[in-house]
Structure formats: structure tokens, C-alpha cells
Amino acid sequence: MDLKAFLKEKGECINQALDRFLPAEDIIPHNLHQAMRYSVMAGGKRLRPVLMMAACEAAGGEAERVVPVACAMEMIHTYSLIHDDLPAMDDDDFRRGRPTCHKVFGEAMAVLAGDALLTEAFVLLSSPETARRLPHGTLRRIIHIIARKAGSFGMVGGQAVDIEAEGKAIDSPTLDYIHTHKTGALILASVQAGALAGGADEAVFAHLTRYGEAAGLAFQIADDILDVVGDEKLLGKKVGVDEARGKATYPALFGLMEAKRRAVELRDLALAALEPLPAAAEPLRQIACYIVDRTT
Amino acid sequence: MDLKAFLKEKGECINQALDRFLPAEDIIPHNLHQAMRYSVMAGGKRLRPVLMMAACEAAGGEAERVVPVACAMEMIHTYSLIHDDLPAMDDDDFRRGRPTCHKVFGEAMAVLAGDALLTEAFVLLSSPETARRLPHGTLRRIIHIIARKAGSFGMVGGQAVDIEAEGKAIDSPTLDYIHTHKTGALILASVQAGALAGGADEAVFAHLTRYGEAAGLAFQIADDILDVVGDEKLLGKKVGVDEARGKATYPALFGLMEAKRRAVELRDLALAALEPLPAAAEPLRQIACYIVDRTT
């Protein structure tokens, strides 16, 4: 299997679907819809949608079935970036290589664009089109998991603890909380949603959950490492900002070597979780390796 | 029927349910959960939940069935107030008679508390408890209507146009857009969600939709009027702020007399829409009168 081709194919599928699902810029309010599209179509890796499609296939389903859900997840991810970049939050001027949403559209419109994207995700999740692809009970469970993992017990909870920890000395459990919630939660939810859409039974769902937990945490540690050793041009954002800002990161707390060791350990945990699964889980295997190996 | 007693009874029912559905303050992250509760439990009129329960009864259902949906609606309404009060938006220091969320918890936490409340609304809407009370298809339609009316085609869309209009001379269609979207959309969604939960057929749904449209617009015009003639102590917020801020309002564009005439006209439209409905629609009738008559 060629991971690069897989990522490209699924990524393009998601980009086309996002273009179709996002409100058009010529619909009122123009500025709001422009701001939403500006941030979503800025060209991220679409990691969460791709993971969801791969998990759906690993569970025995067709990836196509989960495309609207995957687009909703990318909208939620993008809203979180827009709000995270606000002056009151991380105050970032650049994201994915271009000016952040509030830099282009102003702070008020950036708050609203984030709000609208989060809301639009649930418009899409509950739409007739999505409902035609998934059984009613499955769809409700998927909406519930995504909402829970995006809210105060998931991503937003992680952001809240992260902001309070800024500039303070924090302990290992707090760092783990931030990592598993701020980034890990949506990655886990993506894998779980894909699993449910693919028709996973309880055992397969449990395996994929273990995979999603390990891969999500590995991704955040890798992200922390890249902020120390990464190439600004390749990443499309400034490096070294975590340290300058006194952010709680794995390398800051345990050192770079230990962070890399932990990332590799989590990758292996993720791979072990996939062992009982059939060959259709191969993309998930390779994504776990890709997440960690780009840091070395 | 005693409207005051009705509002009190339903309002208390909603307050108890909100207390049960909102994350407890002793769960991490404490500050985030405190901020969410601070704003939700500040004691609003619970107009949207009460309208939803009344619409459910008018359509022949038991109001109890729609309580979780009504609580979700109040969470969405509260998130919109928190974000609306932010310095980048309306920059308000007081709301419902006490300091606004960002004044107490800081701007970053207020952004996150709003995000978390919006998300928690969909956690609740898709929860097993809500699903036990409503048929699957009905619940999906309700989620879809609420999300759509809360997003860029509804409330957030209205806020975006409102912010862009600030300080500019605007025309009557733009003002109508702002009013029907910014406030009207959630009021209409509340009535429609109640109608569906109550088992409304197409005809009843159409009647209640006409009621919700008229009542929603009447409410916003009444709110504009109260900002000119209202009593700060009774309202729990400053008056005269719309004019000071150059906000687009009905009295500003057409004068106070015409605004009052239009509010009465909309009340009568709302009442006419209820005429085909049985006696169970009496609370809806009285609420429409209450909305408008408090301005005179």
C-alpha cells in the first residue's frame, strides 16, 4: 500500500465534499461564509477525516459512507483552530502558512466563523443526506461521541486546562490531561465514528478505540517535538512558540529524548491494537507510523 | 389560564433540568464548568424553553418529553449571549444584572465557555436520555432544525450582518434580516422543535411555524423598544445602548410609534396563526401577548 497516494486520494475526496457542504460565499452573509471557507479550505492534512475513513474501512465498511461525518469533523477541527488563534487565546498571526482568520476578517467575524463552523458540523451530521448513509441509531451514537469529545469533557476541556497552565510549572498528569483532551479527543472520536459507521462490533470497536487513544496522544507529542526540531517552511507555522509562551509540552517536561521514546512507544501500542484486525487496517497502521516517524 | 403561574412552573422545571444536565463544577476543568454554569444559571426568563414546551402541548404532546431539547436550546441561547458580550463583539460588562462571563472568568475562558455550551447542547440532544423520549426520525429532524437555525443561515448569520451594519445607515430589508435571524431564528426553532416533539402533522407544523415567525420578530422589536423606554432595574441591563452604539433597530429606523404598531401587528398575526389549534394552544396565545404588551 502506498500511504502517500492513499492520503492524497482521501484528502481530495474530503476537499471536494467540504466544498460542496460549506455554504457558498455568494450566499448572505458573504463575509461570514468567506471567513468559514478561508479557514477550512486553507489546506490542512485532513488527518482526522482520513483517519475516520480508514477506520471505517478497517471495520469492514465503505469509506464513502462516512464522508459527511468526516467533513463535519474537519469543520469542528477548523473552528477550534480559529478560536485558538484569537488574540484572547494563543494570539497567532499565521496558520497553515497564511494569515489567521481574525487577521483577515477581524476578531468579531473570526469568533462568529468559528461558532458557525461548529454549528454547521451538526447541521451536516443531522442532515437527510447523512441520515441516508447510516442507520438511525448509529448516526445518533456518532453525533453523541463527536459532541462529547469536542466539548468540555474533550477538546474544549483540554484547551481550558492548557490556558490555565500557561507559564506555570505543571505536573505529568496535567500534561497528560491536556494532551489526551486538546488533541487526542477529536482523533479518538474520528476513529470511533469511523468504526461505528463501518459496522464494528464491540470487540473491533474496543481495538480501534485503543488505536485511537494511542495515535491521538502520539500525534500531540509528535507535534510538540516538531515545535522544537521542525522546519518552519514545511510546517507552515512558526516553531519554538511553545517554549517562548511557556506552554506545557512533553519535551519541556521530560526532554526531547524521552518525548521521542514515548512517541515511538505509543506508535507501537497503536500498532499492537490493530493486530487482531484484517488487512483492511493497513492504512491505519501506516498512518500511525507516519505520525511518529516524521519527527525523527 | 394563569400565565405567570405557567411561566413559573415551566421555568422551574427547566432550571432543575439544566442543573442536572450541566457538567458539575467539581469536575475538571473546574473553571470552565463554573463559567458555563455562571452564565446559564444567571436566571433568564427561559422564554425559548417555555415556548418549546408550550408548542409541544399545543401539538398534542406532553411537555415533559421535550425538556432535554429545551435545555439544549437554552444552552445555545446562553452561549450566544456570552460570545455576543465579548470585547471583540458588543463589549458588554453586565448581563441579567450581573457581570458578564468574560468580566468574571477572563476573555479566553468566556470564549471556551461559549464553545463548550454550544457543544454540550448537541451532547444533550444526541444523548440516550433524549433518544428515549423521542422517535429516532423526529429527533434527527429536531437536531437539524436547531443546528440550522443556530448557524450561519440563522442566529450567527444575523449576528454577522448586525456587526457589519453597526454605525452604518441600513435599509429596511437588512434590518428585517438581522431581526429574523439574530433573535427570531432560535425562537422559531424552539416552536418548531416543540411542534415536532408533540407529534404535529404538516398542517399544525405550518400553523406553529407562522406563529413562531411572528412571535420571534415581535420579540426582537419589543426588545428594541424596551432599550428605548424600558426600566434598567426591571431589565437587569443598561438601556439606551443600541442608540449609543449606532445599532440597527426598529425604533431607530421607523420611530417608536411605528415600532409599537408593528409589534402589535405581529402579535395579532401570531394569534391568528393559532386560531385553528385546540385549547392547548392557550399558553402560546398568552405568551405572544406578554411579549408585546410589556412594551406598552
Image (cartoon, coloured by chain):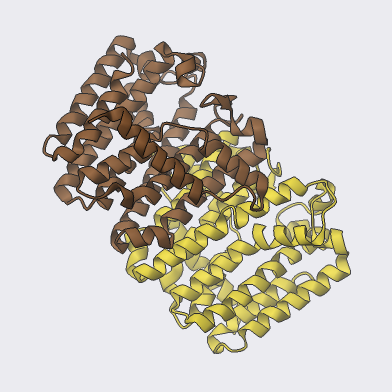
Chain colours: A yellow, B brown
The front one of A215 and A95 is A215
**The N terminus of chain B lies in which quarter of the figure?**
top left
Residue B206 shown left or right of residue A174 in the figure:
left
Q: In this view, does B236 lie above or below B206?
A: above
The front one of B74 and A36 is B74
Q: What x and y, as percent, mark residue A49?
A: 53, 66
- Residue A203 seen in this snapshot: yes
Residue drawn at point x = 71 percent, y = 57 percent: A178
Q: What x and y, as percent, mark residue B22?
A: 52, 48
Q: What x and y, as percent, mark residue B291?
A: 31, 25
Q: Is residue A206 above or below residue B94?
A: below
Q: Is residue B198 above or below residue A220?
A: above
Residue drawn at point x = 79 percent, y = 72 percent: A262
- Residue A95 seen in this snapshot: no
Residue drawn at point x = 48 percent, y = 32 percent: B43
- The quadrant holding residue B89 is top right
The front one of A62 and A172 is A172
Q: What x and y, as percent, mark residue A94?
A: 69, 47
**The C terminus of chain B lies in which quarter of the figure?**
top left
Q: In this view, does A202 lie above or below B179?
A: below
Q: Residue furthest left?
A: B276
Residue A45 shown left or right of residue B280 in the figure:
right
Residue A79 shown left or right of residue A201 in the figure:
right
Residue drawn at point x = 85 percent, y = 51 percent: A169
